[in-house]
Image (spheres, rainbow, N blue to C red):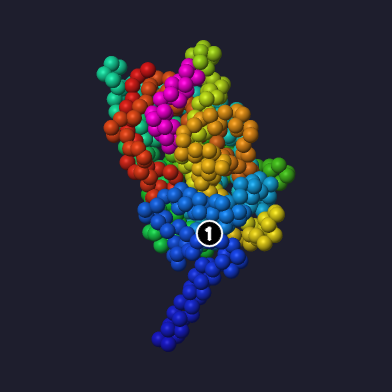
């Protein structure tokens, strides 16, 4: 009995010391930090009543004019360097990337194989996987997938026509769910080669499981916070993050699809086919000449899983927020429609890959939407070695420290974007883009670890919006929420409830 009392006392003392050390880490180094909460750190309200965008945006605004290259931050129990200086952000992402290659996020390939995807992997495993996957996202590969995207978009427009009467002043439509059903069908087809038909039947397992993956966690608040705070220890303890039914669904689907294609020798122009070919190669030669093994089933499933999740949610949300803004700014919408029609006329009225690429103003609208509605609020890196901030010898980021680059906060900094709350696609005219540093716009990240699927996401978003704007006019109605209410449980910028707009045929 006495032993357990001593043990409990010792453990309690260690926990108390750790909390004290963590809470005073930056203060003891002369780096400013808001006093952290003993449990939530500087993330008070996380997944309860505040979205991460708001938490980090408020923190950024507090220290924006302080002159510090970075300030201290506690992401739950992980001590973090919160990057204030855009030049330092560029060093982290590009110039000194070799010291910040890792993200340091939880993943457990052995016990939770779906977490072993490119976004999570670190070190050599990330480098190898990135080199394996990069060839699958070239412009040439996008052209192969383009007809599939067009086919789904044509079905999308048919359904929209059914919902919008021709002569009665249109209809009020909840667009958020419709956009998600469109991108679910696109990604389901391009990732798995399966016609999900979510546009006609919104209650498919594909839709349910993908939505669940973005909102629900396998564990409760405390264990989830533990995984975020101590990813390496959580992995050693064999912890998992993916809900069991989501794991079973996607692993079963991937295994069945691989088995069918290999048995029947089925080949398609989709992401799954490219990964199966990597699996069948058995080995892969790196740029440095090193020979590494191909993909196993678990690795393949993880890449399909993240491609599906990232592709369906980010693109559908971007389309939704773009239509929401265009409905409030009909002058911009009219100009966009004119630009789309003009480009189509130059391409014989056909929506080809080259035609979509030529829609410059559409790109500006999408870029401004991603600035104002940055889906992923921050970028994350980890220092591999001690790093002295150039020009600031007193500011040292120690080895193992998490780096937070609050992208959504940069996008609403009035020094970078005057009148930041205003929706203005002219910010992304060729002249303004050329005059702006690339790290001032980070919806896809920047540097060697930027989003590998950026081209695909842009392609399906362009096609979807081009089809909608050329055929329909969007305006606000009595059911349109202005401003929107965001869901604190969503890992990306998601709204509570739907977004209703009035839709009329053009």
x and y, in percent, of residue 356 in the image: 53, 23
At 47% across and 18% down in the image, what residue appears?
Answer: 338
Q: Judge by depth and name the residue closer to the eye, 392 or 185.
A: 392
Reply yes or no: does residue 305 show up in magenta: no
Position in image of residue 56 (x %, y %): 48, 52
Q: Nearer the viewer, residue 483 or 17?
A: 483
In the rendered structure, the answer to whether residue 477 lies left or right of residue 299 reads left
Q: Which residue is mark 1?
A: 73
Asked if residue 311 can be seen in this view, the reply is: no
Q: Split into 4 quadrants, where in the image is the C terminus?
A: top left
Q: Give the camera-side residue of 319 and 293.
A: 319
Quadrant where the image shows the N terminus? bottom left
For the magenta stretch, what is the residue range?
A: 317-341
| Residue drawn at the location 61% of the way across and 47% of the way down | 86
Q: Is residue 320 magenta?
A: yes
Residue drawn at 45 percent across, 64 percent down: 37
Q: Secondary structure at mark 1?
A: strand
């Amino acid at each position: 009995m006495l032993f357990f009392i001593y043990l409990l006392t010792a453990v309690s003392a260690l926990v108390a010391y750790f909390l004290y050390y963590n809470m005073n880490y930056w203060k003891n180094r002369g780096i400013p930090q808001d006093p952290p909460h003993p449990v939530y750190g500087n993330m008070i309200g996380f997944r309860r009543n505040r979205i991460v965008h708001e938490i980090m945006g408020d923190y950024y605004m507090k220290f924006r004019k302080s002159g510090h290259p970075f300030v201290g931050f506690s992401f739950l129990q992980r001590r973090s360097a919160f990057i204030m200086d855009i030049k330092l952000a560029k060093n982290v992402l590009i110039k000194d990337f070799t010291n910040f290659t890792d993200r340091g996020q939880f993943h457990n390939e052995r016990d939770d194989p779906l977490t072993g995807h490119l976004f999570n992997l670190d070190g050599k495993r990330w480098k190898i996987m990135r080199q394996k996957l990069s060839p699958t996202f070239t412009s040439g590969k996008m052209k192969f997938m383009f007809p599939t995207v067009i086919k789904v978009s044509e079905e999308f427009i048919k359904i929209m026509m059914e919902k919008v009467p021709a002569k009665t002043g249109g209809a009020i439509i909840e667009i958020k769910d419709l956009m998600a059903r469109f991108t679910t069908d696109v990604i389901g087809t391009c990732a798995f080669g399966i016609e999900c038909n979510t546009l006609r039947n919104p209650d498919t397992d594909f839709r349910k499981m993908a939505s669940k993956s973005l909102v629900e966690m396998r564990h409760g608040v405390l264990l989830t916070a533990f995984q975020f705070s101590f990813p390496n220890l959580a992995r050693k303890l064999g912890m998992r993050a993916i809900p069991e039914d989501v794991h079973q669904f996607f692993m079963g689907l991937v295994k069945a699809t691989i088995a069918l294609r290999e048995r029947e020798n089925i080949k398609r122009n989709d992401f799954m086919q490219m990964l199966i070919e990597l699996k069948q190669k058995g080995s892969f030669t790196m740029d440095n000449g090193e020979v590494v093994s191909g993909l196993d089933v678990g690795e393949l499933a993880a890449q399909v899983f993240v491609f599906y999740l990232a592709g369906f949610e980010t693109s559908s949300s971007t389309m939704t927020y773009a239509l929401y803004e265009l409905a409030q700014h009909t002058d911009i919408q009219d100009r966009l429609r004119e630009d789309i029609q003009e480009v189509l006329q130059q391409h014989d009225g056909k929506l080809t890959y080259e035609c979509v690429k030529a829609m410059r103003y559409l790109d500006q609208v999408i870029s401004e939407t991603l600035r104002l509605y940055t889906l992923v609020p921050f970028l994350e890196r980890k220092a591999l070695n001690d790093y002295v901030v150039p020009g600031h010898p007193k500011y040292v980021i120690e080895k193992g420290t998490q780096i937070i680059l609050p992208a959504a906060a940069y996008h609403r900094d009035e020094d970078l974007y005057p009148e930041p709350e205003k929706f203005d696609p002219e910010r992304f005219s060729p002249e303004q883009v050329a005059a702006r540093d690339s790290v001032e716009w980070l919806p896809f990240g920047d540097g060697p670890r930027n989003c590998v699927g950026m081209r695909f996401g842009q392609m399906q978003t362009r096609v979807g919006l081009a089809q909608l704007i050329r055929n329909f006019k969007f305006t606000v109605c009595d059911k349109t929420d202005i401003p929107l209410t965001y869901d604190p449980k969503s890992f990306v910028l998601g709204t509570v409830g739907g977004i209703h707009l009035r839709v009329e045929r053009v």
